[in-house]
């Protein structure tokens, strides 16, 4: 391990064998924290080549269970978001894709900090089982076309151990380490192809567009090198996606979107994610416009909403809550946040909104924390909209008045009002494939 640390400290490219040996040794306990920390710090400063990053990803994916989806016919396409606020796209894009005949076998995470987790959202549906035996998971995908469960405890354990060390040694913010962390779990989960939703902006892990594009490129390169065709969309997270932030509230908004009543930004992004998933599955004769048409049709004719209800029922949940959202338990306190002035909403700090939702009870600071599925908030105004003084900017849902007070303070600080109408934020900033990055109509 000493030699590996020194080689990387001096800027050398490590071999596949060196990386695999280091990952296996640290995961197994034969390499101590202090040597693994030194190695991570050397990587942080010297970086990794594309090959090294792919080898690191492979070694981390190989450290635990691999989910074998071979029993499910067809090309299995996974979708992963790097984390955002109000991001309930799996609940919409997944059923759209399944309704078009492409199987979606998805393992999702729980929320932590200001970001929400898909599994927490689904767990707000009474009876929904977020844990299924592998055989039942595959059976639901084969019969319904889609299943979404929580991530297995033994998927990429090397990533869990290395991330905990990175978190306390100042080595989190490295593109190769971030990319390997995300992709190792996706590869171990067994998908044939992967669509990535890489967030950029105030509420994202990578807050600059260039940093987000570089992360997208690194993950696409990993996917290609390990035999998984991968596409990444770089999407906006300066303001929350949609209007609802919080678990049951986001399920309601996802259902409304599938019934044709959801926010425009959420609908557009989900259709684009679904179209790219369909493209990787070989649909639309290899034409993205054809895939977009398929996705729109599955959404507008109700088939996608039907798929979500079938999935919920197959996993033990009560799908009637999707048809009748007023059946969800209501939060004891519903409180407005009123505009302090008249004008246009010029900015909404997504990070602050995510923190406000967590303060209301919808999020957790540690993985073992409990959450209140009723808690959260609904934005009544988005960037570019006009608001009158005293009009509601947001509506807060919480179990305690003191939580509402703290959440209200954070929301009020997050929303800026000005006289000049701002440009609406760009929803999709770019698309990255093995051929390169595309911003707007330009190939870069």
Image (tube, rainbow, N blue to C red):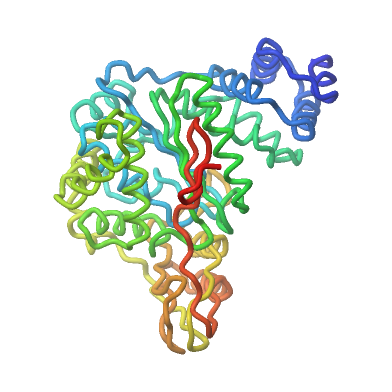
Q: Nearer the viewer, residue 101 or 32?
A: 101
Q: Percent from the top left, x then y, of residue 434?
A: 50, 30
Specify the farthest residue to the left: 301
Residue at x 62%, y 48% (from the top left corner)? 210
Q: Nearer the viewer, residue 304 or 249?
A: 304
Q: Percent from the top left, x then y, of residue 348?
A: 52, 69
Residue at x 45%, y 31% (from the top left corner)? 230
| Residue 279 occupies quadrant | top left
Q: Is residue 380 above or below residue 148?
A: below
Residue at x 67%, y 10% (from the top left corner)? 17
Q: Is residue 79 visible?
A: yes
Q: Is residue 313 left or right of residue 50?
A: left
| Residue 93 occupies quadrant | top left
Q: Is residue 402 visible?
A: no
Q: Is residue 157 left or right of residue 44?
A: left
Q: Percent from the top left, x then y, of residue 440?
A: 47, 51
Q: For the C terminus, which image quadrant? A: top right
Specify the farthest residue to the front: 442
């Amino acid at each position: 391990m000493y030699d590996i640390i020194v080689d990387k400290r001096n800027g050398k490219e490590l071999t596949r064998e060196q990386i695999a040996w280091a990952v296996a040794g640290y995961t197994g306990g034969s390499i101590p924290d202090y040597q693994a920390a030194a190695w991570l710090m050397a990587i942080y400063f010297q970086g990794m080549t594309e090959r090294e990053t792919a080898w690191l990803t492979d070694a981390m994916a190989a450290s635990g269970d691999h989910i074998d989806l071979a029993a499910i016919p067809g090309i299995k396409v996974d979708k992963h978001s790097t984390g955002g606020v109000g991001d309930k796209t799996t609940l919409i894009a997944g059923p759209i894709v399944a309704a078009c005949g492409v199987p979606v076998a998805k393992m999702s995470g729980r929320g932590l900090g200001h970001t929400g987790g898909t599994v927490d959202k689904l767990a707000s549906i009474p009876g929904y089982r977020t844990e299924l035996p592998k055989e039942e998971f595959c059976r639901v995908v084969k019969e319904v076309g889609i299943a979404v469960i929580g991530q297995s405890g033994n998927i990429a354990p090397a990533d869990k151990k290395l991330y905990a060390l990175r978190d306390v040694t100042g080595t989190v913010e490295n593109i190769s380490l971030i990319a390997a962390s995300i992709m190792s779990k996706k590869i171990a989960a067994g998908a044939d192809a992967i669509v990535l939703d890489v967030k950029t902006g105030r509420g994202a892990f990578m807050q600059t567009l260039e940093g987000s594009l570089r992360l997208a490129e690194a993950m696409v390169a990993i996917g290609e090198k390990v035999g998984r065709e991968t596409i990444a969309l770089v999407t906006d997270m300066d303001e929350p996606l949609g209007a609802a932030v919080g678990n049951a509230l986001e399920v309601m908004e996802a259902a409304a979107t599938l019934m044709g009543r959801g926010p425009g930004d959420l609908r557009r992004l989900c259709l684009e994610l679904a179209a790219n998933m369909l493209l990787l599955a070989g649909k639309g004769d290899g034409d993205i416009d054809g895939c977009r048409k398929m996705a729109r049709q599955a959404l507008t004719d109700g088939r996608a909403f039907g798929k979500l209800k079938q999935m919920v029922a197959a996993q033990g949940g009560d799908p009637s809550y999707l048809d009748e959202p007023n059946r969800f338990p209501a939060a004891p306190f519903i409180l407005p946040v009123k505009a302090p002035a008249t004008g246009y909403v010029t900015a909404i700090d997504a990070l602050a909104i995510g923190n406000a939702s967590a303060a209301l009870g919808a999020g957790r600071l540690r993985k073992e924390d409990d959450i209140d599925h009723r808690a959260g908030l609904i934005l009544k105004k988005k960037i570019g909209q006009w608001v009158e003084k005293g009009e509601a900017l947001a509506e807060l849902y919480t179990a305690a008045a003191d939580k509402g007070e703290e959440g209200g303070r954070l929301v009020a600080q997050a929303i800026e009002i000005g006289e000049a109408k701002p440009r609406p934020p760009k929803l999709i900033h770019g698309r990255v494939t093995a051929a390169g990055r595309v911003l707007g109509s330009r190939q870069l």
